[in-house]
Image (cartoon, grey):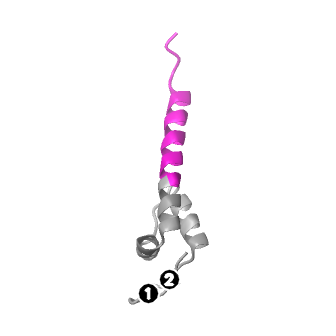
Amino acid sequence: MTDNITTDTTPAITCRDTTWLVSSARDQPLTPQQARQLAAHLAGCAACQVASRQFAQLFAQLDTLLARDAAPDDA
């Protein structure tokens, strides 16, 4: 976790906020401010970098599984 100290005008977010933003970005685009906050937090938080990569892998696996389930039967 980080101290959440920023040197610009983008307010800092917590690790919990980061998790929420990473998962909600799957359903809808982030606002420009949310995207900046997420990028700033990920730049300095190794734990959230790992979690973000894990979410991306999970979402990719879900997409593959859902696409396979949605495919028409070839029989």
Residue 27 higher or lower than 66, as above or below: below
**Of the numbered discs in the image, which one, if any, rests on residue 12?**
2
Question: Residue 6: x and y, percent?
Answer: 44, 87
Tag 2 secondary structure:
loop
Local crowd size for mark 2, using a 10 Å CA cut-off: few (<14), some (14–19), many (≥20): some
Residue shown at 58%/65% (left/top)?
20
Residue 23 figure quarter: bottom right
Nearer to the camera, 55 or 9: 55
Nearer to the camera, 70 or 40: 40
Residue shown at 47%/55% (left/top)?
53
Residue 15 figure quarter: bottom right
Question: Residue 52: x and y, percent?
Answer: 49, 59
Q: Which residue is mark 1?
A: 6
State which region is magenta.
Answer: 54-75
Q: Main secondary structure of the magenta part?
A: helix
Question: Residue 50: x and y, percent?
Answer: 49, 59
Residue shown at 52%/79% (left/top)?
2
Kind of residue at disc 1: Thr
Local crowd size for mark 1, using a 10 Å CA cut-off: few (<14), some (14–19), many (≥20): few
- Give the number of marks: 2
Residue 59 lies in the magenta stretch? yes
Tag 1 secondary structure:
loop
